[in-house]
Image (tube, helix red, strand yellow):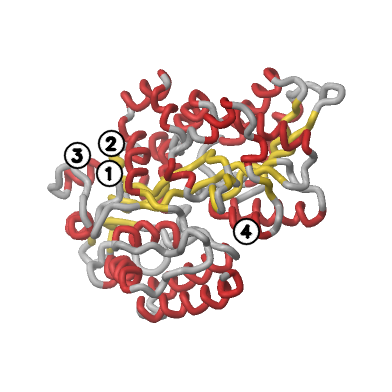
């Protein structure tokens, strides 16, 4: 769920496209929307996968199209679908599933599962990732770049504050106590180093879902037809977030930017941050200090939402194109490639057997932080996903931001968000 510039993607695409052989006579072309919304030189990796697949499958040509952020990519994919020229396959948010079904834009993977090998493949993913990939007894998305929210901490700053650099906070109370020790002020009382940052721009609902899960709340039903934004546990979670800045003064006030939070961490402006495991490679490459990665601290329980993108297959593509896309998706999600993708990007490898590959065993042996997000899957819940997902999520985001900026009290903010979500979802029940 990390952002990246669109231009780098299109430049890399142009380079990749030029390097490819001409399309073989009678070959099937698979257009492929990919969201440049992640850290690292992802376009080069995707171009390399496309070229490698074509070498092994000369009758299929993969054509990556870098479509901007996840939000821009779903808009472009649905616009192309309505115009009758959709990409054959797309990586879109796992939470876009209900929207894509309602728009009649995708086909279930079950239609292509013919052999024992196909069946094994469909059952190979972590169950936690299938919560946002299946509904009504069918599989609509194949997990690809998936994540959870994790806690990163600067071990040097822990040491300076008299904290054990190897021990992250385990509970909500510890998180506050540690953050108090880690917040530094100058002689005038201005903060020079914050204890903790939880971003509230871009994907506030996603980070908040970690807090809500820890408070013992689930934000929506599995059918995607009802939300529970105004439940007492949800309000308690929001109050905790608001209190970090208002009451404890260990978290920046107002809206904390998603994109600048890792930068603040690298520049030692913050000692602990919540962000996606998809930032792991970015942090490893840019932090000039020893850092730790941990599961999110527990409230009543541990918990994080899953996140990230799934592959989908377009309903308007021809049967030959759909079959070719299925072949490519199976190929790119083998244990070895799932492992390599995780090593290159920081995303969680989407299947357990990826962690048994020699490459992953070596990587986790040298860099144990890479196993944290996988281990946290045991406590993970489905990411918030409903019919009319963007509008229903916006209602929650608006409520969260109103509470964090002080425009509304947490209880009122969640009551208003629930009323709006209820209005949007009522026709689906």
Label pair 2/1, CB-CB below 8 angstroms: yes
Q: Is residue 98 left or right of residue 408?
A: right
N-terminal of the pair, mark 2 or mark 3, is: 3
> Label for residue 221?
none
Q: Residues within 10 Å of mark 4 (few under 14, many from 20)?
A: some
Tag 3 secondary structure:
loop
Depth check: give the residue in front, 49 or 192: 49
Q: Residue furthest right?
A: 25
Choose mark 4 or mark 2, whichever is in front.
4
Per the model, the C-alpha gap separating discs 4 and 3 is 43 Å
Choose mark 2 or mark 3, whichever is in front.
3
- Which residue is tagged 4? 99
Choose mark 1 or mark 4, whichever is in front.
4
> Label for residue 290?
2
- Which residue is tagged 3? 166
Per the model, the C-alpha gap separating discs 3 and 1 is 10 Å
- Which residue is tagged 1? 154
Residue 103 pos. (x, y %): 69, 58
Residue at 60 percent across and 65 percent down: it is: 388
N-terminal of the pair, mark 4 or mark 3, is: 4
Q: Is residue 356 visible?
A: yes
Tag 4 secondary structure:
helix
Image height check: is 43 above or below 254?
A: above
Per the model, the C-alpha gap separating discs 1 and 4 is 39 Å
Residue at 71 percent across and 45 percent down: it is: 314
Per the model, the C-alpha gap separating discs 4 and 2 is 42 Å
Depth check: give the residue in front, 374 or 413: 374
């Amino acid at each position: 769920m990390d952002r990246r510039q669109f231009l780098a993607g299109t430049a890399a695409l142009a380079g990749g496209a030029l390097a490819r052989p001409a399309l073989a006579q009678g070959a099937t072309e698979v257009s492929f929307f990919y969201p440049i919304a992640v850290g690292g030189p992802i376009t080069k990796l995707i171009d390399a996968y496309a070229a490698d697949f074509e070498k092994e499958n000369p009758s299929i040509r993969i054509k990556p199209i870098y479509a901007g952020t996840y939000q821009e990519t779903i808009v472009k994919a649905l616009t192309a679908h309505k115009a009758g020229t959709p990409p054959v396959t797309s990586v879109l948010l796992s939470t876009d599933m209900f929207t894509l079904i309602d728009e009649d834009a995708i086909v279930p993977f079950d239609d292509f599962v013919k052999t024992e090998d196909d069946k094994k493949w469909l059952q190979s993913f972590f169950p936690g990732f299938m919560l946002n990939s299946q509904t009504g007894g069918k599989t609509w998305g194949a997990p690809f770049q998936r994540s959870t929210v994790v806690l990163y901490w600067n071990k040097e700053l822990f040491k300076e504050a008299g904290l054990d650099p190897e021990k992250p906070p385990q509970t909500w109370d510890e998180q506050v106590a540690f953050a108090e020790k880690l917040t530094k002020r100058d002689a005038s009382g201005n903060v020079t180093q914050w204890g903790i940052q939880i971003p509230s721009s871009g994907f506030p609902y996603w980070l908040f879902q970690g807090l809500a899960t820890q408070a013992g709340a689930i934000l929506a039903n599995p059918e995607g037809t009802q939300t529970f934004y105004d439940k007492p546990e949800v309000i308690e979670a929001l109050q905790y977030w608001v209190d970090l800045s208002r009451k404890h003064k260990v978290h920046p006030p107002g809206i904390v930017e998603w994109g600048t939070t890792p930068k603040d961490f690298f520049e030692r402006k913050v000692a602990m941050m919540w962000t996606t495991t998809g930032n792991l490679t970015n942090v490893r490459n840019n932090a000039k200090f020893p850092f730790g990665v941990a599961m999110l601290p527990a409230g009543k329980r541990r918990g994080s939402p899953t996140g990230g993108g799934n592959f989908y297959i377009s309903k308007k593509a021809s049967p030959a194109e759909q079959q070719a896309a299925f072949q490519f998706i199976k190929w790119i999600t083998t244990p070895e490639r799932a492992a390599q993708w995780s090593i290159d990007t920081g995303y969680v490898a989407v299947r357990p057997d990826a962690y048994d590959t020699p490459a992953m065993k070596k990587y986790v042996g040298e860099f144990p932080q890479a196993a944290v997000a996988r281990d946290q899957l045991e406590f993970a819940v489905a990411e918030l996903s409903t019919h009319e997902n963007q509008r229903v999520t916006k209602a929650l985001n608006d409520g969260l931001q109103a509470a964090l900026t002080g425009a509304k009290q947490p209880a009122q903010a969640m009551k208003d968000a629930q009323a709006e979500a209820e209005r949007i979802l009522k026709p689906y029940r």
